[in-house]
Amino acid sequence: MEKKSENFFERVYEVARLIPYGRVTSYGTIAKYLGAARSARMVGWAMNNSSGKDVPAHRVVNRVGLLTGKHHFDGTNLMQQLLESEGIVVEDNKIQNFKEIFWDPSKEL
């Protein structure tokens, strides 16, 4: 099991590294793209373990644009600050123009 999840995490990181600057995607969308539609939580775990792997984990949010992973970032508002530095508007832990900036690898790769 350990090998399988490590391999899945690496595949998740490969997709996450392709998310364009100023765009976001969801855990479930990455899971679906990788052929594991029911593995959104595993994608979340991969993001939680991505520190030091040059993965833009701040660009991965939940299916409605909430910053559900923000407590895994150092500092109180680092995830929000990283998104805002890319021009993404966040209010009350939610991305405001979510549909407009949403990136779907199934459609864009």
Image (cartoon, helix red, strand yellow):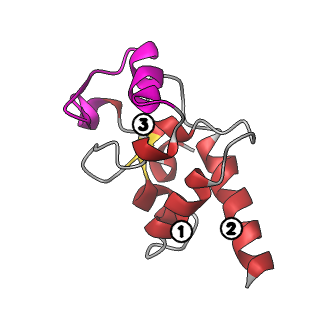
Q: Disc 2 designates what residue?
A: 8
Q: Are marks 1 and 2 in contact (CB under 8 Å)?
A: yes
Residue at image x 19%, y 32%? 92
Q: Residues within 10 Å of mark 1 (few under 14, many from 20)?
A: some
Residues rendered magenta in the picture: 75-100
> Residue 19 at what x, y percent from top left?
55, 36
Q: Are marks 1 and 3 in contact (CB under 8 Å)?
A: no
Q: Nearer the viewer, mark 1 or mark 3?
A: 1
Q: Amino acid at mark 1?
A: Met
Residue 24 got which mark? Answer: 3
Q: Quadrant of the C terminus?
A: top right
Marks 3 and 2, how far apart at CA: 20 Å
72 above or below 97? Answer: below
Q: Is residue 91 magenta?
A: yes
Q: Disc 1 designates what residue?
A: 42
Q: Image quarter for residue 103?
A: top left
Q: Residues within 10 Å of mark 2 (few under 14, many from 20)?
A: some
Q: Is residue 84 magenta?
A: yes
